[in-house]
Image: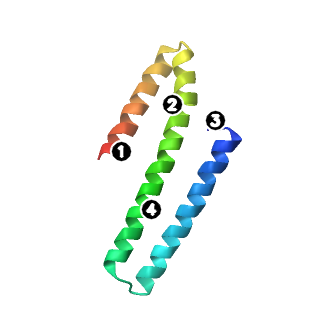
Amino acid sequence: MHMNEEKRTQVLNRLRRIEGQVRGIQRMVEEDRYCGDILNQISSVQKSLRSTGKIITRNHLETCVTDALRSGDKDAAKQTYQEIMDLLYEQIQ
């Protein structure tokens, strides 16, 4: 992955925070907490993951995808287009 140090740090910090949130949800389930509270926390984790995914997606488009398209290699471009379509299709489901 081609990611500058600032973005890498930002993504890692977000992932560590998400990891803590997930551990918190596990504790809530172990403690038999109210379902609505657990669902709120799950929603929060999902939003955090989507936000982190946006950062990584933008980085991927700005680096890996751009490099493949600028290379002039038609096979690399075709593969890149297919990869983007697969990623978008997976996110929609």
Residue 52 lies left or right of residue 2; in this view the side is: left
Q: What kind of residue is marked 2?
A: Leu
Q: Relative to the observer, which residue lies in front, 33 or 74?
A: 33
Q: Earlier in the sequence, mark 1 or mark 3?
A: 3
Q: Nearer the viewer, mark 4 or mark 1?
A: 4
**At x 51% / y 36%, what residue is drawn?**
58
Q: Residue 45's mark? A: 4
Per the image, the residue denoted by label 2 is: 61
Q: Residue 91's mark? A: 1
Q: What kind of residue is marked 4?
A: Val
Q: Could you give the CA–CA distance between mark 3 and mark 2, rounded to whole angstroms? A: 11 Å
Q: In the structure shown, which secondary structural element does the residue marked by tag 2 occupy?
A: helix
Residue 56 lies left or right of residue 84; in this view the side is: right
Residue farthest toward the bottom in the current orientation of the protein: 31
Per the image, the residue denoted by label 3 is: 2
Q: Nearer the viewer, mark 2 or mark 4?
A: 4
